Amino acid sequence: MSIDLHSLNHRQQEAVTASDKALLIIAGPGTGKTYTLAHRIAYLLKGTAEPHSSILALTFTAKAAQEMRERVSQILQEEGACEHDDRPWIGTFHALGLEILRNEGKRLGILSEFRILSESEQIELVKEVLSQTMPSESLARVKKWIRLLSDRKNGLPPDSSVASSPLFELSDRLFNCYQSRLKDLAMVDFDDLILMPLTLFKEHPDVKAAYQNRIHHILVDEFQDINNLQYEFLNELLGPQTSLWAIGDADQAIYAFRGANVHYFLRFQKDHPSAKTITLEYNYRSAPPILIGAQSVIAYNTNRLSTACIPTITDVSSPITLFTTPHEKAEARCVVHEIERLIGGFRMESPVEGPDDVGFNDIAILYRFHHLRSHFAENLKQAGIPYQLVDKNVAGSDSPFSNVTPYLEILVNPHNDPAFRTLFPRVDKTFSMAVMHRLSSAAQNKGMSLYTLLSTSHGKGLLETRQEETVTQLISLLKCLQIHLQTGNLKDVIADICQGAHIPSPFDSQEQAGWLVLAEPFFTGSAAEKLSPFLETLSLLKEGETYNPRAEAVTLMTVHAAKGLEFPIVFMVGLESGIFPATEFGDTASNDEEERRLFYVGMTRARKRLFLSYARERYLFGEKRERTPSPFVYEVSPEVVETCPVPSQSEKKKKPKSKQLSLFSR
Amino acid sequence: MRFIADLHIHSYLSRATSPQMNLESLHRWAQLKGVTVVGTGDFTHPQWFGELAEKLDPAEPGLFSLKNKYAGDRNAVPESCTAPVRFILSVEISSIYKKNAKTRKVHNLVFFPDLPSAARFNAMLQKVGNIASDGRPILGVDSKDLLKMALDTSPEAYFVPAHIWTPHFSVLGANSGFDSIEECFEELSPYIHCGETGLSSDPPMNWRLSALDNITLISNSDAHSPDRLAREANIFSTDLSYAAITEALNAPESGDFLGTIEFFPEEGKYHLDGHRACSQCLKPDETLACNGRCPTCGRKVTIGVMHRVTQLADRPWGFLPKGKPPFFSLTALCEILSEILSTGPRSKKVQNEYFRLLNLFGNELYILMDCPLNDLKQSGLSLLPVAIESLRKGDVEITPGYDGEYGKIRTLNDRKKQATQLKLF
């Protein structure tokens, strides 16, 4: 029995039906990567007598996993196959790690009820650990220490800026302290979800063998994003009989800052010398000028595997438009004006004849950093154009749930000290670092959690009267919520938290509708049951996963978040030297080749129209700075670019018709 | 009682509207025009909602009156025109969304009988979109979902698709609309009792679609400045209340809805097809005969409203369904004065005459529709009764609009002018 392969091209068919033990598929943007992967899974499912759960498909985001499940079941439905309980396992590396730990973690002495440390809790925990020796570390420094801990867990060399610090020698002690606190709290951090299963496999070969025997086929999506630990984890899962099928595009590797390394893509061939490589070469997404432009940029990279894609879209041929604007406000105005035009003049007063198939959700504005978005959001708001902001930090202030998650975490486990520590300063500003330090030390000396300390008489005398009142109120609110948890659904509990703590409700935010779509499945049924899975889902989220494709709104997101998505119309903005590549933002250790890949990823999100823009002047780091275009802009093949100078308001008044200046006529 | 209602206008808080679109001016101009019930427009805009809450008093059930202290200078309205004015809470919402793989842009009108319901509706919209930057908000909400939200807010909510034929922004529009009301509203279609014909279509055009037989055709000005009030409007004979108005529209057979006041649809600038640059104005069948290309230059012609009606029509031109209320095609009094005085409609001369006539006879719609011609002969303008008589008989000369070129309506021609001159001597 086989599935219908007529909709696939020859290379795709070859990839779907291959029987090789190891296979690497190089799939450039728009070449049908997800489509091919889904067909491969369906093909394996239909062709095998083995249990479906012997197939393991690993993705990098929960969203991609969900999409894959839907596609596979759609293909199977079209084939008339019925669904049953025996399903392939499709999920992220971290979700797999989590499941292994939940099942077998007791072998490592981990409580099966362990919790995943959220980003904000991690900050608090590190602050707590640091407070013994460095009580006044800035947030930026705390984040550096977190990075150091993470790099260490991932087996990476330390970041040079930390390694050169005189305090670096403290890192061993810090690491041990941090680990032992995690154990006390029955928590694991994000890296542990991969690291611990690896340890488990090494220390308990019987567990490893059991998994290896169960899994016959492993498929890996976005293989270029794999990092050191994940590669090792993958190797451990590979039994003597397991086939490995990996698909990805080395030109789209953009996660070096998470330890991902294009090197593993290249290493695959070394580790599996018999492996065949198939290249999917037909691009079904972008209009030829966009594809030509993007390929002309990526061609400047030397560390490459891929070959050029062949365009198949022939009905659209608008060139790439480059807006050169006097300053960032003019840039935002110009982009929003262009959006109005594209929508076909959405006002009666200006019914410009536009292409009538463009809707708001066909349009994305992509930028290198979140803070570049403010002028665009503001202008869209003024123009009355609906938009959605796709955010990165689950725990960061961007999430509409950021204010309620500490409460929810405490409801799960009142002895979660890091969650308490994130909460106090929000409830009452007088809970300074010093106060928190005093409380934490007192609790540790007595060997109890902050909650026990403060809800009993042990905490007496540590706080001022007003602070004590705050604590009493907070504890009684938590006790109330504990009761609601047993009776209401999660949505009600969250509403109660907002009301009780006087914080804005996450349900009132239209800009972030994507979050609500994500949360919706957890709002039915008992709150007590849905609470933990809800928090777990939030903590496993990665950038871009809050994007809601159904929202009728213009999407604003970083280029990183846009990976894996496509839009008929894309605006890449703020394309200036220093921003893209991000040399002025030293925090992200990146290199030109990686930044160029990111630029390439951004360009190849576009199907029909691509607009690039930069400003000659921008407020950055508190001052007005002169800007020059990103070097990548010059790398776009000039014959597919139309330069469109945007005059400033004052220039406009002076000379209504400005001369066409070409950026490339240097 | 018999009264006239204009249910769709915009406040100064909508884009491209006159700063004069405030409650005080609306109150004054409603009297000058002869309108009793005026839509407030824009109630979703927080600032306008604030003004409504502050300046209006509840009057008859579901209707509001302007507080005395805001009703202003009595002299601003000639005694001949003074009349009570009522407001009804209304808003137009622009929904832009994808459905069945096409981008749809549909404008809809929503009415509520009380401020708390409107406030609840606003709160709901605020969660899904931005209602503070434009009096006519643009939302990425499916029209059907919008209807559901209105009905969920209050069972008394009233929902009317606006100017249903406008090419770019309407439920049946050629460029971004649907082919039927049902395609847009699906199982909620039974809640759609009315459709606004818009300036560019009149009832006979709509009667060509049997699909619209159960839809009551209403007409409103969609005014962006106060002097445009009531250029299209509705005539009722019922109690003055929200419920009586909506019931009259839901059951036109009751006879409580006396019909509409209409533009000549040919006056609209997208009435017929054509290519403006080559002065080619084409009727729908002519457009089809030349494959949609301009006979002069061969470029694609712009498709007008008449063409779209022809596309969807299942009845011949001139079909007269039974039991439909009448309609009255009018043009503005200032336009007629402009013809008589051979000067621009916004000129001082025309404006002075306009107010002189209102002082003499009463409000504008009375002059255009009801004032005995013998009375008008006392106006000192010998051509006025001639022009008005022609208008009432529909004896006007029409140059239809196309491809952005406005159409022209003339109530007088040289023959009529000469005949009048002869009678004088």
Image (cartoon, rainbow, N blue to C red):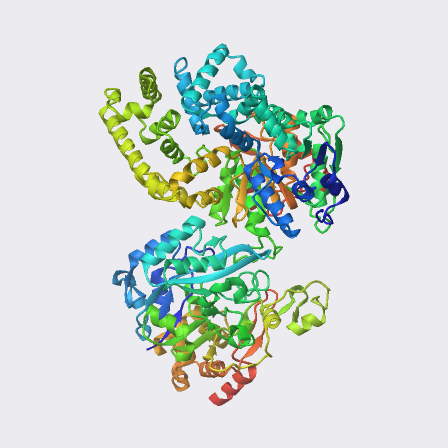
The foreground one among A255 and B31 is A255
| Number of numbered discs | 0
Residue A153 image-quadrant placement: top right
Residue A487 image-quadrant placement: top left
Residue B47 vertical placement versus A398 (above, below): below
The foreground one among A241 and A320 is A241
The foreground one among B85 and B376 is B85
A178 displayed left or right of A271: left
Picture coordinates of residue A387, whole percent (x, y)? 50, 46
Residue A255 visible to the viewer: no
Identify which residue is drawn at 71% across, 62% down.
B299
Residue B409 vertical placement versus A644 (above, below): below
Picture coordinates of residue B225, whole percent (x, y)? 43, 62
Picture coordinates of residue B257, whole percent (x, y)? 40, 76
* Image quarter in which the N terminus of chain B is found: bottom left
B43 displayed left or right of B275: left
Picture coordinates of residue A72, whole percent (x, y)? 62, 45
Residue B338 vertical placement versus A281 (above, below): below
Identify which residue is drawn at 24% across, 23% down.
A457
Residue B230 visible to the viewer: yes
The foreground one among A548 and B319 is A548
